[in-house]
Amino acid sequence: MNTKQVIQASAQVIRITEVKVGDVYKRFDKDYDDRVYFGIIQNIHNDGENSIIESIEYRYSYGSLDVEYKIMRGEKDYILFPSSPDELNFEVEKAKENKLREIESAKKTIETNERIINEIDGLISGDTLKSLKTMSYKEMSQKQYEDKKALI
């Protein structure tokens, strides 16, 4: 099955007709199938021969949000589609939630390490040593052990 034909048969064609400062877009990277960038147009330049768009782009990747200043020049093809502030906000919220989970995990790690340090400090200071005891044991020669084992 040709994926392109399936998509073309089932999806509406979208053409961007105007670009303004503050517009939100979604950009797909031709070189990487899984990279999606959400951008906000910061500035547009056109001197009649050269067209340049300045934007801030956000990409959710491996649980974090990468932020990058992007210059798009008119001589290169970009795969851009309109997006919405809500869609951008959704991606940013995912990154925020992940960071909050990382913070909670780091707090638990800190608490565990603090408990371990307290135990070590107790050993070093001797406070813990005061309550420790040596196990009961009995020493015997190897022959005594073997003789006792034979009786069992």
Image (cartoon, rainbow, N blue to C red):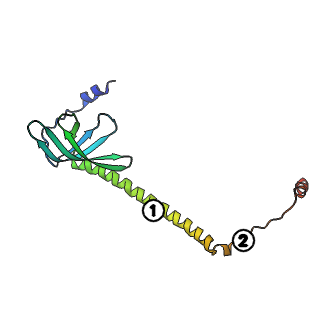
- Work out whether 86 lies above or below 100: above
Q: Is residue 139 left or right of residue 49?
A: right
Q: Quick check: can you spot residue 82? A: no
Look at mark 1 in the image and give the residue it sits on. 107
- Work out whether 46 lies above or below 136: above
Is disc 1 surrounded by few (<14), some (14 to 19) or many (20+) residues within 10 Å?
few
Q: Is residue 143 left or right of residue 44?
A: right
Look at mark 2 in the image and give the residue it sits on. 133
Task: State the image quarter where residue 124 is shown.
Answer: bottom right
Q: On the rendered image, what quadrant is the N terminus found in?
A: top left
Query: Circles 2 and 1: CB distance less than 8 Å?
Result: no
| Mark closer to the chain start, 2 or 1 | 1
Q: Quick check: can you spot residue 92? A: yes
| Residue 27 drawn at (x, y percent) | 25, 40
Task: State the image quarter where residue 83 is shown.
Answer: top left
| Residue 81 drawn at (x, y percent) | 21, 39
Query: Which residue is rendered at x = 80% and y = 65% of the image?
Result: 137
Query: Element type at marker 2?
Result: loop
Mark 1: amino acid: Lys
Is disc 2 surrounded by few (<14), some (14 to 19) or many (20+) residues within 10 Å?
few
Mark 2: amino acid: Lys
Estimate the spatial distance between the alpha carbons at disc 2 and disc 1, rounded to whole Å: 34 Å
| Residue 28 drawn at (x, y percent) | 27, 38
Task: State the image quarter where residue 15 is shown.
Answer: top left
Query: Which residue is rendered at x = 64% and y = 74% of the image?
Result: 126
Tag of residue 69: none
Query: Element type at marker 1?
Result: helix
| Residue 57 drawn at (x, y percent) | 26, 46
Q: Between residues 23 and 30, which one lies in front from this camera angle? A: 30
- Work out whether 130 lies above or below 24: below
